[in-house]
Image (cartoon, rainbow, N blue to C red):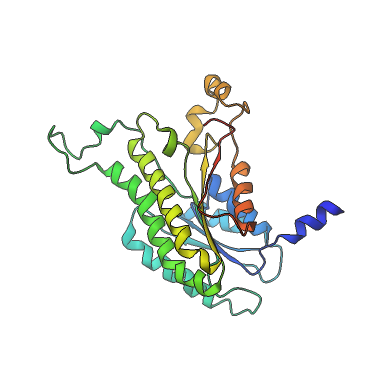
Amino acid sequence: MFKNSIIRLFELKGRNAIVTGGSKGIGYQIAIDLANKGANVFVWSRNKEQNEKAVKSLPLIHKDQKHIGILCDLSKTNKLEESINEIKKQISLFNNDNIDNKIGILVHSAGITHSELLFKKSSNNNDNNYHSINDNGNEIITTNLLSPILITQSFLKDMMRLQYGRIIFIGSVVSEMGNKGQTIYSSSKGGLNGFSKSLSKEIGQFNCTSNVISPGFIDTDMSKPFINNEQLINSIPLKRIGNTKDISKTVLFLIESDYITGQNIRVDGGLY
């Protein structure tokens, strides 16, 4: 009974949340857990079929709750404004005193990587080409760093007016450890660390927090090649690959926390 009373203390009924990359992997688990806490969840992803399936599967635990799919590829920054305006339009249509009229929770879970040595990332084969990277590198930077910055910027004033904001970026331990073939990927995730840290100092006075969660090896499509690697597993003090629930529980912890901001929390089983 005591345990159940504690659980009821933290709920998100009436809150509106965006989860980018919310149709699969870590993002999908985060969307499920936010929905189970009562939040209205905007599932932002680029695959229509996966998006629709994810939205339909999210739990509805109270009569005012709604979940909405947003289709947009984060590597296409020229499409962001349309999606952001659609979210704000949908919230305006809620027309319910029990629901916030703005976004209060923003979880950046979408991310991509293309493992490739840096000297192969040149946009052409010219040995003296020092001023450009190939399409893979540009896609990584745009998806993992630039788009999260632009999306966050678009909802900041709403959070400040609401006097409530929880911004969470899903980073990576690679941003601190480094990894062969992931120079651009680790740079993009490292950029999130710096952005979130500085952002936290700008928005704290408005009861808004910004934090990064840096997963280690988590059982998702992105890490499939490593899941059964015994040498890797033995290098992790907890002797297992993490799961998506390990990350989503940390997201809920940061949303509930009023006095944690500007932090990078590693969820890696002690790997780093």
Provide residue 185's location: percent of width, then percent of height.
37, 40
Image point (37%, 67%), residue name: 81
Image point (27%, 44%), residue name: 135
> Vertically, is 141 above or below 11?
above
* Nearer-the-camera pick, 71 or 31: 31
The quadrant the N terminus occupies is: bottom right
Residue 147 is left or right of residue 40, and the answer is left
Provide residue 28's location: percent of width, then percent of height.
56, 50
Q: Is residue 260 visible?
A: yes
> Vertically, is 118 above or below 160?
above
Furthest residue in direction right, as rendered: 1
> Vertically, is 68 above or below 191?
below
Image point (64%, 57%), residue name: 256
Residue 81 is left or right of residue 241, and the answer is left
Total labels: the figure holds 0
Provide residue 26's location: percent of width, then percent of height.
55, 45
Furthest residue in direction top, as rendered: 231
Provide residue 221's location: percent of width, then percent of height.
50, 38
**Quarter of the image where one finds residue 127:** top left
> Vertically, is 127 above or below 257?
above
* Nearer-the-camera pick, 8 or 27: 8
Residue 247 is left or right of residue 86, and the answer is right
Q: Is residue 47 visible?
A: no
Image point (41%, 64%), residue name: 153
